Amino acid sequence: MEFLHAMTIGPIVEIIEYPTFFMEVLIGGLLTGVMYSLVALGFVLIFKASGVFNFAQGAMVLFAALTFVGLMEHGLPMWAALIATVAVMIALAYAIERLVLGKLVNQEPIILFMATLGIAFFLDGFGQTIWGSDVKPLDVGIPSDAIDVGGVLINWFDITAAVVAGLMVAVLAIFFQKTRIGRALRAVADDHQAALSVGIPLKTIWMVVWSVAGIVGLVAGVMWGSKLGVQFTLSLIALKALPVLMIGGFTSIPGAIIGGLIVGAGEKVAEVFWGPAVGGAIEDWFAYMLAMAFLVFRPQGLFGDKIIERV
Amino acid sequence: MFYREAGQFKTNYAKDQGIFPILQDRIWIYFVLVVAFVIIPVFGTDYFLGSIMLPFLVLSLAAIGLNILTGYAGQLSLGTGGFMACGAFAAYKLSTGFPDMNIIIVFLLSGGITAFVGVMFGIPSLRIKGFYLAVATLAAQFFLLWLFNRVPWFTNYSDSGVISAPPRAIFGDFFITGPDATHLSKYLFVVTFVILFALAAKNITRSGTGRNWMAIRDMDIAAEIIGIRAMQTKLSAFAVSSFYCGVAGALWAFLYSGSVEPLSFDVNRSFQILFMIIIGGLGSIMGSFLGAAFIMVLPILISSLPGMLGLSIPVDVISHVEFMIMGALIIFFLIVEPHGLARLWTVAKEKLRLWPFPH
């Protein structure tokens, strides 16, 4: 009975009694969700353009952040480190295209997925071999104090993250809609064969996509790095981006954002109000269960392309 | 010259359908059995038996389990660690709740419980496929581990959270768990168990059920159209696979590590076992053993190599290098030989059939 009360009536009463606290939790969750979306965006880009489910996105986030911090520790000014890291990520995209994906053309998607698992392991090991595995603090000058909006405390850092994510979506939208290469990308995403036959170079396009995903990874890495410090856990955050993708749909950029918001808000609210009743730390799995429940009703996610199966 | 089937006539169907239809294969298997049951127990040191053979055999069993699900039935799973933990905790609860129950029955029952849990998490596979399913199985991984960590009932309300496996004997004084058990008795028990289970798995995959799994793997819609029930087939794959993983988890906790802790079944364990079947060969029982051996031996090699060469490399760097090599090997195998070590084995046998003649 007590347990039932703690699961059903208790949290609702608590929410109604302390609306400001609820708002604070909700907004905190939404803003964390934005951070998840940053990682999820990289996944969506690659999946859209090449149909590869890139498990290595998390490792790319970690690798980019490690390189950025490592270069800064070696005395490079921030702008130089940023440019150098972008160059490294582009080189990485080239290497992945050349050494891995190029050799696996025409393989089943599941094989490609497992190949990206290999890439993820390789990058995790490579980055830490070069730059070491201790936690590196990263300060890019984002203030960490909180402001008061109508009685609800919001962290400056979270607001910055939200703004960055918004900017990124805008830039990506312009890139996809207005530039020549963006149009080519959309064509490739639509139909590989047709794109090839009108003369779009597939290999170049894939390289571009992986580079863009690498740069998105860098942004995500810098944001997460300045929140948690640059460390191995960043690679695990990618795992949290997976339920985000499943809820939003693998092929939709707005989906990645909305999915992130749902996951972030859902897990924070569940943790704070329902967590104590079942022993806490339900953040670990809540997102996955939520995504699973979503999928049973909408297998393609909220905004994903409808899955059509043919024999 | 030595390896060919010429002159070996099959006079009935049973012989024709044997697992090892060729005499030379049978000799090879007898040889392996002699090595496993006589040579290794007689000459193996405690370190070799306890720290190399035990984890190798237990992980092979888990790899067979995952191979049934991923290699034969085509359902990618990242929840192996969770299912192993489920088996370990089920065995712990059963053996402490019913102290008189024979430990073999405990292991089998805990496999059964895991099979039930596996079916529960397999239900979404009817609606979702491919990567989506892989992510959904991550839910099993994280949820199950959280459950065993947080709900004190599973650890019998122990304060430290670290619980040790109770001492149990199969019969009389033949202890296989607890402080009285020798490495030799543990090894003999596990090797018998694993060989029997491998044989069972081989036969299941050769049966009608196994053929249904493969049909679903190759194209589930087409399989449904020719009359294979997708739901039963997928769920049976989940059940059998989870059974194997559960038993493996129970063996790992009771016989290898001696303590039941969620930490040894985290998501890295799931990846490790997935890598075993990728490198060993998807859809091959033999491959599960080869892959497990490969992944077990590799870290030992990597960590002892610098010492042999006279270099001193810090331990954490070695573990990172291990990650790198593992990742690179996965990619290498996927590019060069997507069917893994098992395929190399088959190729070697075909070459041997002709040898020493060119045609």
Image: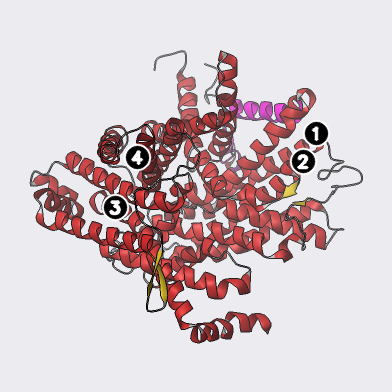
Which is nearer the eye, B118 or B202?
Answer: B118
Element class at badge 3: helix
For marks 3 and 4, give the CA distance. 26 Å
Find the magenta span and give its range.
B14-38
Chain of the residue where label 3 is placed in the rendered structure: A
What residue did someone put label 3 on?
A47
Q: Would you identify the image quadrant in which residue A114 lies?
A: top left
- Residue labelled with disc 2: B189
In percent of width and height, residue A172 lies at 20, 55
Camera-side mark, 3 or 4: 4
Q: Which amino acid, mark 3?
A: Phe
Q: Residues within 10 Å of mark 2 (few under 14, many from 20)?
A: some
Q: Is there CB contact under 8 Å for labels 3 and 1?
A: no
Report in which chain the residue with disc 1 lies. B
| Chain ID, mark 2 | B
Residue placed under numbered mark 1 in the picture: B184
- Find out whether the residues at labels 1 and 4 contact each other: C-beta distance under 8 Å: no
Q: Residue B145 appears at what percent x and percent y?
A: 61, 57
Q: Which mark is residue B5?
A: none
